[in-house]
Amino acid sequence: MSVKRDFAVGLFVWAALLTMPFWMPAIGGYTGLATRVVVMGLGAMALNLLLGYTGALSFGHATFFGLGAYGAAMTIRYLVPSTPLALLAGIAVAAAAGAAIGAMIVRRRGVYFAMSTIAFGQIFYFVAFRWSSVTGGDDGLTGWTRAPLSLGPLTLDIRGSETAFYYFALALFAAGVGAMAWILSTPFGRTLVAIRENERRARFLGLSIERHLWLSFVISSTLMGLAGGLYALLNNFVDPRTLRYDQSGEFVIMAVMGGMRSFWGPLLGAFIFVVVQDVVSSHTENWMSVIGLVFILVVLFFPRGLLGLLGRRAPA
Amino acid sequence: MIQLVLFGVFNGLIVGAFYALMAIGLSLILNLSGVINFAHGGFLALGGYLAYSLAPTIGFWGALLIAPLITAAIGLLVERLLVRPLYGRDPLYSLLLTFGLAFIFQDGLRTIWGAQSVPFSPPAAMMSPLSAQLFFLTGYRLFMMALVAIAVGGLFYVLGWTRLGLRIRAGTRDLETLSTLGVDVRVLRNLNFGLGIYLAGLAGVLAAGQLGLSPTMGDGLIMPSFVSIIVGGLGSLVGTLLGGLLIGVASGLAAVFFPSAQEAVIYVMMVAVLLARPRGLLGEEGRVH
Amino acid sequence: MSLLDVEDVTKAFGRLVAVGGVTLRVEPGELRAIIGPNGAGKTTFFNLVSGFFPPSSGTIRFDGRDVGALGPAARVRLGIARTFQITEVFPELDVAENLRVAAESAAGLAFSLGRGAARRAGMDGEVDRLLATAGLADRRNRQVGELSHGDQRAVEIAMALALKPKLLMLDEPTAGMGDQETHDVARLIRRLHRDEGLTIVLIEHDMRVVFNLAQRIMVLAEGKTLAEGTPDEIAGNETVQAAYLGESA
């Protein structure tokens, strides 16, 4: 039953994603907004590998998102105008930071883990903020654009065509999400879920909890770096806000709102959050209050998330 | 040179006193209720703005007395209505809730008092330097340090010698046992939350006189407060106090000699402390988690 | 050589001495029970042997090695598996998944990022075998959190078995169970001991279970060994009757 249902849900999700540039205008959106949904969705799902599947409360994941974004942007701005190399650089920077920070905090739990992730993230925020000669400081890094993609003789104009860039981003989303689905289906992925379910039991099964947590943290950071790189390319711009803790909080609320115990939940959460943010911020000065209210309402009334309401179990 | 160092250290102590005051309030709430109060900076700013609005009517001293109390009362209400339903649930939820609250605070303050920062001045007599050599020493700054010292001292007195304080400390160690002894844990958590928010409000009024008022003023203080707690060691209020002063001085010195690193130095210190001593300066053994 | 050789081990929490100088030798193939009133230090003793925390003093040797400084995971790899007084399982996973996690851990696959290795290591067959041993074959796809208390306990014991232990430690395996469930779990323990030749140490309050199963019994009271011997010797021991059996009867 559940296999059939997973298959049907997956089919629906992919159909919706493949056609999003076409139906997005019907709900008042545009192609760039669709790309934003996909990119933020990848970020929220990457966070959820840690949050929902491993049960570790990272509240500082914008760090890796922002590092991916800066890594990509600075590669193009200063080194080489290549989109693939930019993304690879962003991913590498995020992964390295994830490995270093992860190693320092895997022994902490719960709120203390959360607090440490937030605090570590601030280091990079202030570096980006203050080192303006290189990062552009508070104004952000401009003066660069994503480069067209050349595939042998073919050139895909992801610079000129928003639609082409959407499908480029979707392809990388698919790769990232596919990797996550694969990981969750392996013994390693099952072990992560077990650690979430009962750390003490897991430890007394001979599992090395800290190493699992660390690896999960690194994988999650790496995918976050991919999302961040795509985000920089989408905007042809990056600024310190991508690194800030508000951005971390937004990823968490996306995952929670959609349902962190379901594979696709965070994507649904990202879709709603991104669209609502876009609509609200163009209609009222007080969009921060609206977003704040969304946080509070989700916590008080939908703690299990929208997909959690359906009572489905996560595929593990 | 010596003068510059003194300047840096003194400025650092002032900032550190704010960090510590805020961090101790955060710590109180964290230790007893397991809640990271992200809205703490919002409460701080609220305290400052309330003082700003009250001062024309009741004067600076009246505002200094009343504004933190009103802030604390609002804190009691927020705890009762929004935070209390989340006790016993995954800490994720209280974190998200107070995060959302912080957004609303910031937006609300901007809507009521405007996005531009507004000046808030303590009595003019307190603002002139005490000596030309030590130009940074004003009466207000000394007064501020003294008041923070009194507030912290008062808090430790409350925790050490009053029934409420004893219960808070006992509850931090073992809440279940305390509730079987007939103590109403919900009331205790409520009062404790209010106590923490009172300190934030007080810090807000003092900070307003020193740094000026803006809706985002709490933002700049909350992260260093987290770091104070981590550096000082989880579970230890004295550690939090030390942590706050220490990173304050570090950032004060950096501001003089290496201004672009004045924020980052705080986090570098945190990393250094965590690497050398994972449980922080005075953290309890086995309380790494 | 004894499989487990605990020598004069002490555990103090501040001024509270939970275990004060206990010595215990368990031979291969033995089924040993530890009894004693509440607060006697039985679970603390289990925690010491399984590596929950290190002893304050004394030595713990297992299979000829000093394991006192090792953490729980390392002791599991040497062959010590345990269950807990309050059943510890993975409630949102189904029965087969619970056992699979344990089996894959034992097979060294916990970091495997492929599906092939688990297949080659025969994990499917291993899970089936464990399900059959614990009598859970018909519940393999049920979520463990929804099972009866007795079935959850069986899952927990099967997970411990998946680790292919040399020593199985059961902390009150029949706690909170009705007669039928108690009977079923006791039968499972006897089978594991007799048919699979497992060495078992268990803490138990139900005296019928203890005197039915155990070959030797150690009685703890206030952190110290009160008596030690065969069930008959313990039943006839007046100190034990005074301190423990009399009280609970």
Image: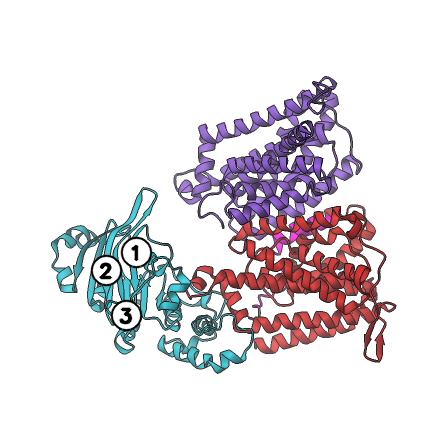
**Which amino acid is tagged 2?**
Leu
Give yes or no for residue A300 being in the magenta stretch: yes
- Rendered location of residue A262, percent (x, y): 60, 66
Q: Is residue A302 above or below residue A151?
A: above
Q: Disc 1 to disc 2, how far (Cα)?
A: 10 Å
- Rendered location of residue C65, percent (x, y): 31, 64
Residue wearing tag 2:
C24
Residue wearing tag 3:
C199
Q: Which subunit holds the residue at mark 1?
A: C
The answer, for residue A258, to whether it is visible in the render is no
Q: Colour of chain A?
A: red
Give yes or no for residue C208 being in the magenta stretch: no
Q: Of helix, strand and loop, which one carries label 1?
A: helix
Q: Earlier in the sequence, mark 3 or mark 1?
A: 1
Q: Which residues are magenta?
A: A290-316
Badge 2 density bin: few <14, some 14–19, many ≥20, Cα 10 Å:
some
Is B109 situated left or right of C17 in this image? right
- Circle 1/circle 2 CB separation < 8 Å: yes
Q: Which subunit holds the residue at mark 3?
A: C
Chain letter for the purple colouring in the rendering: B
How many numbered marks are there? 3
* Residue at (72, 39) in percent of width and height: B259
Badge 1 density bin: few <14, some 14–19, many ≥20, Cα 10 Å:
many
* Residue at (76, 73) in percent of width and height: A18
Chain letter for the cyan colouring in the rendering: C
The answer, for residue B28, to whether it is visible in the render is yes
Residue wearing tag 1:
C45
Q: Earlier in the sequence, mark 1 or mark 2?
A: 2
Do marks 3 and 1 share a subunit? yes
**Which amino acid is tagged 1?**
Phe
**Which amino acid is tagged 3?**
Thr
